[in-house]
Image (tube, rainbow, N blue to C red):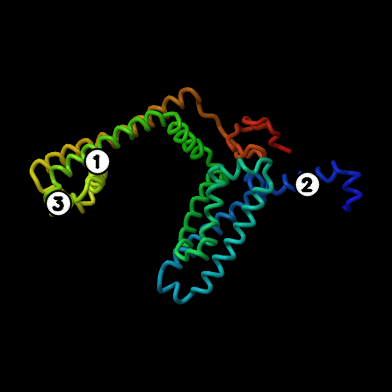
Amino acid sequence: MNWVDKLIFPKMEKSKLNRRKEQIFELIFESDTFYGKLFNIILLVVILLSVALVMMESVASINERYHDLLVISEWIITILFTIEYALRIYSVQKPWRYFFSFYGVIDLLSILPTYLGIIYPSSKYLSSIRILRLFRIFRIFGLTDFMRGGNVILIALRNSRAKIVVFLSFVTLIVVVIGSIMYVVEGGNPESGFTSIPTSIYWAVVTLTTVGYGDIAPVTAFGKFLASIVMIIGYGVIAVPTGIVTAEAVRGNRKHPETHKNTQVCQRCHDGNHADGAKFCKSCGYDLHL
């Protein structure tokens, strides 16, 4: 269509453009059509292949023998992922929503390490983050029960964030106080390893979380007694956040009973959490079946 036709039939040109975007969107984002599911399955296979290539490249013996092949394969896959990412942004109605969405951030992070590897060679190994893109497998194969489980956890975390922030603030104050006391008690003994207050606070965090690296340990009787108290408190530190999130999850299930979900994704707002048979997006009202 030349510029005269575009001037005379602007709506037709716009309609064709929108239709092209809808076709690309349906192919890339949707998984309830044959070609959409096929595309996403191929994408998952390529993701697994890409992560395997990164792992093999980190093995010295394999990298020494197949270095050129691994590098070329990685760049081919990265270019394909870059084209796919550009098409995703092109096909959605509001690109910025996809850009800042969970999958949008993961898709971007999956292609950046290879390009950053030109400047910082070791950063290319961060390409293994592409494995996170496999979260799409739940939507592709219609595993809505797992998707609902993930949504319940996310909602519970969001609803309990105020309580968790207060709890973590209290824990932070505790480790600072305990670390300072431990430095006063053990700081004069070079064998203990408590060389400064920050180091002592590090020990308090490691001990309170029941990790216990053992690189720093008290040697005095009072220091061991204080360490024992911190260890006991650590069990409560683990249990409290779990209880907070669990209570919010149970409360959320009572307020919003589960309903079966489909895999339809809104082209405008990118919401993919709709009930079966929904014709319009529950968030923005956009037609799901254009």
Q: Is residue 130 above or below residue 8?
A: below
- Looking at the rendered structure, the secondary structure element under dot 1 is helix
Q: CA distance from mark 1 to mark 3?
A: 18 Å
- For label 2, count other residues whose C-alpha is less than 10 Å away and answer few (under 14), some (14-19) or many (20+): few
The residue type indicated by label 1 comes to Leu
All told, the count of numbered labels is 3
Which residue, given by chain and number where applicable, does mark 2 sit on? 17
The reply to whether the C-beta atoms of the residues labelled 1 and 3 are less than 8 Å apart is no
Viewer-closest of 92 and 166:
166
- For label 3, count other residues whose C-alpha is less than 10 Å away and answer few (under 14), some (14-19) or many (20+): some
Which residue, given by chain and number where applicable, does mark 1 sit on? 208
Which residue, given by chain and number where applicable, does mark 3 sit on? 192
Viewer-closest of 236 and 229:
229
Front label number (1 vs 3): 3
Quadrant in the picture for residue 11: top right
Residue 211 visible in the displayed image: no
Q: Position of residue 248 (x, y in %)?
A: 41, 28
- For label 1, count other residues whose C-alpha is less than 10 Å away and answer few (under 14), some (14-19) or many (20+): many
The residue type indicated by label 2 comes to Leu
Q: Earlier in the sequence, mark 1 or mark 3?
A: 3
The residue type indicated by label 3 comes to Ser
Viewer-closest of 80 and 46:
80
Q: CA distance from mark 1 to mark 2?
A: 59 Å
Q: CA distance from mark 3 to mark 2?
A: 70 Å
Q: Position of residue 135 (x, y in %)?
A: 51, 47
Mark number for residue 162? none
- Looking at the rendered structure, the secondary structure element under dot 3 is loop
The residue that appears at 67% across and 43% down in the rendered structure is 92
Front label number (3 vs 2): 3
Viewer-closest of 277 and 165:
165
The residue that appears at 25% across and 44% down in the rendered structure is 201
